[in-house]
Amino acid sequence: MKKTLEQLTRPNVWALKPYSSARDEYKGVTASVFLDANESPYNAPLNRYPDPLQLQLKAEIAKIKGVTPEHIFLGNGSDEAIDLVFRAFCEPRKDNVVAIDPTYGMYQVCADVNDVDYRKVLLDADFQFKADDLLAAADEHTKAIFLCSPNNPTGNNLLADEIHKLLEQFDGLVIVDEAYCDFSEAPSFATQLQRYPNLIVLQTFSKAWGCAAIRLGMAFASEAIIALFNKIKYPYNVNLLTQQQALEMLRRSPEVGCWVATLKAERAYLMEEFSKLSLTKHVYPSDANFFLARVTDAVSIYNYLVSRGIIVRNRNSVSLCGNCLRITIGIRSENEALLKALREYK
Ligand SMILES: *Cc1c(COP(=O)(O)O)cnc(C)c1O
């Protein structure tokens, strides 16, 4: 990273003095009478504000991710961390970001909300990118480059060599969104934080962990980047029920491992059977819990499936995804219901 973090950060954010909550000011554990936060004394434990830095949860996540808690930010879904990248680093109407295309739609939505120019660079026919093409789209106002691996909606891992090249050569931040990494054989970039001070890795409890409802996302980055995120986030951005449920899921991680193994086996089965359907033109390889398939007529097949009570994602109007459907892997009975309906499609 040839630019310093201060040069990449919005001046108002760099200078900001954060809100200091009652729980920030008293961090001890020995007190037994809490009359500092205008909470109700009734209805324990929901009466108390939750830990603003989620330290117990971070300690458990640190153990399984091989990073220390100072390198972890937790948010209201990884969508919160995506938004914080814009709010921390991108000056509206002046700075820009670069992203692969097609990819996850939230990067562009957050760019638009924050009035930051969003520059798309088309993937190749194998849904891969070249670091040089992204670097060519960047200029002195490019604060961040967004990558997603395994990518949504294409399903494939991006080439690790190109990600490394980008991390080495780009003088801004590189975000690697690993929402689907649990379904992939590729190692996580979270182990590369010491090597790359400009790396931000995103993961989530919404997919493999089966916890989309609790809204918990993770960002792994340098201590300095995490400190910036902590400075500008809402004080109590992860509620108590979410923190408790995530701790419970971490205790149940062997069970989660079984879910992932089953879904990977179902993925192989469903993709194999899907490729035999007469309406299928191409099934793209997948490193995620979904796959992309090109079909004869995505719009009419999508509408037909809706009429049969089966919902898939129509990606027909997305770059490079004409006539493509994105299919999430379900349990065997759901996958069979989909296949049965499609065999009866005329
Ligand atoms: C589903 C998904 C997420 C998860 O977002 P949450 O806000 O954590 O639910 C993040 N990135 C990508 C690419 C996704 O597909």
Image: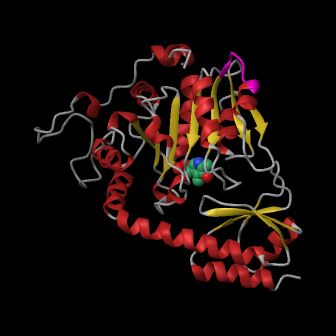
Q: Position of residue 187 (x, y in %)?
A: 50, 48
Question: On the image, which quarter does residue 67 sit in?
Answer: top left
Q: Position of residue 41 (x, y in %)?
A: 21, 48
Residue at x-position 36% and y-position 66%: 254
Question: On the image, which quarter does residue 339 sit in?
Answer: bottom right
Query: Taking 260 as reference, is 25 above or below it?
Result: above
Question: Where does the magenta region start and end?
Answer: 136-142
Q: Position of residue 30 (x, y in %)?
A: 10, 38
Q: Is residue 329 left or right of residue 213?
A: right
Residue 87 visible, this angle: yes
Query: Taking 336 as reference, is 86 above or below it?
Result: above
Residue at x-position 71% and y-position 26%: 135
Residue at x-position 69% and y-position 32%: 131
Q: How many marks?
A: 0
Q: Position of residue 341 (x, y in %)?
A: 76, 83
Q: In which quadrant is the N terminus drawn? A: top right
